[in-house]
Image (cartoon, rainbow, N blue to C red):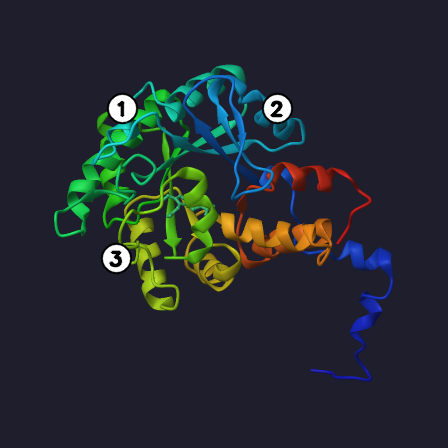
């Protein structure tokens, strides 16, 4: 290997044209997935206090958030629901009249070319806010939860989801959901599993937005310990074996190493999820005039692509697509 002064790296860097020509990693609107919070009721667009710039939408007003995204080339949406009722077993998760199911039906009809993913979890639907069936001793029962998740997934798929995205972190949920979908003749509906979902403090603003914070305890008994690399990879690899079609890694920024390792381990498509806490970090700093909003957004999200993510789930999807359309803003 040659070294300085024979080699001068700046020969391919100082000139703007060759620098642009050599850009390895790109971010395009087609890589982006926009999460949407759908609520019960009509004519609702309620700004979410914990997520500035993001709103709760009733089904009838979804075009106001979907259309600008589609016009800029964002093709996929991840739906979260705020149901009209909650109970101990989260049965509104598989009620066809609830917001996510109604939104799926309505969006499938209005926009035949978009791709719809439904978040499959119990925490938005249970009165206690845990991601499954809670035993009297306060532990979430893994195997009881599998049947609830399967019912939710089948209900979402019947309503029009192209993929379901289990985010509960129970063991065996991917194979249970796959079996339930297949038994219901929904073999074409895929599973985008939250394969590496850490027990993270970065979900705080989301729990406020979705009303899904656990009323007691935490999620450390089922979500992954942030500082255990081998355990995280092992858990993600289980989902591959159970038949997941795509894998999600989150929170994205703190998990770049995990994304890179999974990229080496599997040929499955990978998505990084820039979660609510990452969203507020970037907007708050930009709002305070401490960071350049456009450049930091582009750099942050492109880094996920560099780490090996095919897709990026982000509340910034529409804004990013508009930045990418504006050729004046370049990294
Ligand atoms: C549901 C779910 C959560 C997120 C996605 N699906 C919250 C949680 O696990 O508490 C977090 C997304 C975000 O923070 O933007 N289990």
Q: Nearer the viewer, mark 1 or mark 2?
A: 2
Q: Which mark is residue 221?
A: 3
Q: Dot 3: few (<14), some (14–19), or many (≥20) neighbours within 10 Å?
A: few
For residue 101, what is the image quadrant? top left
Give residue 207's position: percent from left, percent from top.
41, 44
Residue 102 horizontal side relative to residue 330, left or right: left
SS of the residue at dot 3? loop
Q: Residue at x 79, y 84 (%)?
A: 4
Name the residue located 30 percent from the left edge and 34 percent from the top edge.
Answer: 125
Q: Secondary structure at mark 1?
A: loop
Name above or below for residue 198 compared with residue 316: below
Residue 320 horizontal/vertical position (percent): 66, 42
Towards the viewer: 73 or 204: 204
Q: Could you tell me how far apart the alpha carbons at marks 3 and 2 are, in whole angstroms? A: 39 Å
- Residue bearing mark 2: 67
Task: Looking at the image, tell me whether mark 1 or mark 2 is earlier in sequence order.
Answer: 2
Q: Nearer the viewer, mark 3 or mark 2?
A: 3
Of pointers 1 and 3, the one earlier in the residue sequence = 1
- The residue closer to the viewer here, 295 or 324, is 295
Task: Point out residue 25 in the picture as x, y percentages from the top left corner.
Answer: 65, 54
* Secondary structure found at label 2: helix
Cβ at disc 2 under 8 Å from ligand 1: no
Task: Say if disc 1 is inside 8 Å of ligand 1.
Answer: no
């Amino acid at each position: 290997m040659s070294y300085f002064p024979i080699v001068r790296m700046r020969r391919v860097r100082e000139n703007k044209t060759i620098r642009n020509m050599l850009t390895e990693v790109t971010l395009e609107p087609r890589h982006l997935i926009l999460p949407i919070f759908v609520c019960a009721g009509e004519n609702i667009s309620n700004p979410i206090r914990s997520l500035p710039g993001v709103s709760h939408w009733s089904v009838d007003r979804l075009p106001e958030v979907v259309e600008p995204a589609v016009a800029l080339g964002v093709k996929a949406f991840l739906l979260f629901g705020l149901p009209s009722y909650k109970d101990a077993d989260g049965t509104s998760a598989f009620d066809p009249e609830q917001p996510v199911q109604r939104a799926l039906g309505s969006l499938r009809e209005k926009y035949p070319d978009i791709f719809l993913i439904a978040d499959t979890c119990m925490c938005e639907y249970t009165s206690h806010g845990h991601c499954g069936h809670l035993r009297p001793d306060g532990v979430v029962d893994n195997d009881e939860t599998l049947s609830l998740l399967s019912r939710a997934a089948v209900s979402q798929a019947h309503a029009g989801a192209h993929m379901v995205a289990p985010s509960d972190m129970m063991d065996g949920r991917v194979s249970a959901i796959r079996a339930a979908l297949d038994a219901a003749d929904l073999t074409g509906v895929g599973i985008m599993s939250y394969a590496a979902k850490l027990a993270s403090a970065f979900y705080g603003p989301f729990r406020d937005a979705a009303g899904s914070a656990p009323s007691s305890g935490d999620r450390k008994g089922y979500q992954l310990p942030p500082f255990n690399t081998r355990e995280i990879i092992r858990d993600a690899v289980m989902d591959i074996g159970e038949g997941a079609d795509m894998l999600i890694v989150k929170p994205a920024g703190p998990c770049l190493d995990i994304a890179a390792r999974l990229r080496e381990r599997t040929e499955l498509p990978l998505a990084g999820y820039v979660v609510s806490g990452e969203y507020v970090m970037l907007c708050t700093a930009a709002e305070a005039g401490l960071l350049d909003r456009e450049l930091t957004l582009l750099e942050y999200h492109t880094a996920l692509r560099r780490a090996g993510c095919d897709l990026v789930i982000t509340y910034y999807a529409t804004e990013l697509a508009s930045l990418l359309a504006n050729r004046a803003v370049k990294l």
